[in-house]
Image (tube, rainbow, N blue to C red):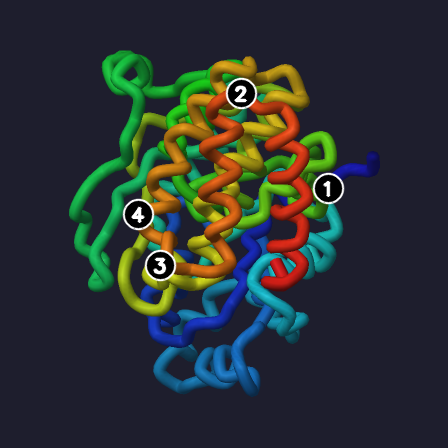
Amino acid sequence: MPPAQYQLVTLIPAYKTKYIGELLMALAVQTRPADLILISDDSPGAEFARALESPAYAGLRAALPIEVHQGPRNGAYENFKALIALWAERSDYVHLLLDDDLLYPEFYEQHLTGHRQGRFSCSISARWTAAENGMPIRGMPVPPAVKADPSRLLALDAGVMFTTTVPECKNWFGEFSNCILTRETAPLLLKPEFEGVSYAGLWDLGAFLAASLVAPVLYIQERLGAFRTGGEGHSAQLMGKHMKAAHLGYSALALGGKRLGQLSAEQARRCYAGIAPALVQRYGGQEDMQVFAQLLFRMAAGEDAAEAEFLDQWNRFLTSHQL
């Protein structure tokens, strides 16, 4: 592989214009700025690109190495993949920053400093959950053993990554915005599956787990950013296809993790048993989810045939919902 052109490139799948000022400011005040910022504008009528050209942002934009490209306008994850193609492995490290999340000033400096400590597949820093106005309101459900560890930097292998997340149906790592991928692992985003099982809907957690199969993940026990709740994000739309897929995605990760040998049959069943009642409670009246509620109870009971039926129905769901 030839030497990279840059050390760090930021990729922004742009859609929402509401937080442009905060986004540009967060990038401008980094103590170690990105070398290149690629924006793929997926907004209707290129609203994001037009807003970016506003005189109000002229000073911030002039100070940042920004390139704007038209997005594919074929769904959020297709825009992620388009950005990976635009990036074309031009840097040692790459950051997929969603347009409504918050970065604190030392985000890039702390991540790159951590990567100098050894070979890691990616680095993930702790983050706050924030209200729509950016005010932190709570942390993440970090496992007690991790929280109690006095080390600021932790190297987590695949065993820890899989077993502390999937069986508990708990993503305590966060999203792409608080992760730095490497030149080696960023291309994993182009094929989000384990052993033929797609983990669409939980693309972020799935990518972190996939990266852990390449090399340990560096976890930084310092909150260097925040995930913004409310507003127009997918997480605010419980009945939307993305949140439905996020629920089902845990079962897909459990099945894929079991096929990989990273999870035992018992650990996979624990995941199925955790998701099944949540599906009944939240989506019992949703026609497209009823078959899964029934299947997951059977999977939790250990019926092997139910896993094959789930995979068939899961693939149909992804196709019909264009995920």
Q: Identify the residue at horizontal 44%, vertical 27% (top origin).
A: 271
Tell me which amino acid carries mark 2.
Gly
Q: Which residue occupies 30% across, 47% down?
A: 281
Position of 142 relative to 197 (above/below): above
Residue designated by label 4: 281
Mark nearer the N terminus (1 vs 2):
1
Residue labelled with disc 3: 238
Distance of mark 2 from mark 3, alpha carbons? 29 Å
Cα distance, mark 2 to mark 4?
22 Å
Q: Position of residue 178 (x, y in %)?
A: 42, 42
Work out whether mark 1 precedes mark 4 in sequence or the reverse, and give the earlier one: 1
Instruction: Give the image quarter of residue 94.
Output: top right
Whether 206 is drawn above or below 323: the answer is above
**Mark 3, residues whose alpha carbon is within 10 Å: few (<14), some, or many (≥20)?**
few
Density class for disc 1 (Cα within 10 Å; few <14, some 14-19, many ≥20) is few
Measured Cα–Cα span from mark 1 to mark 2: 48 Å
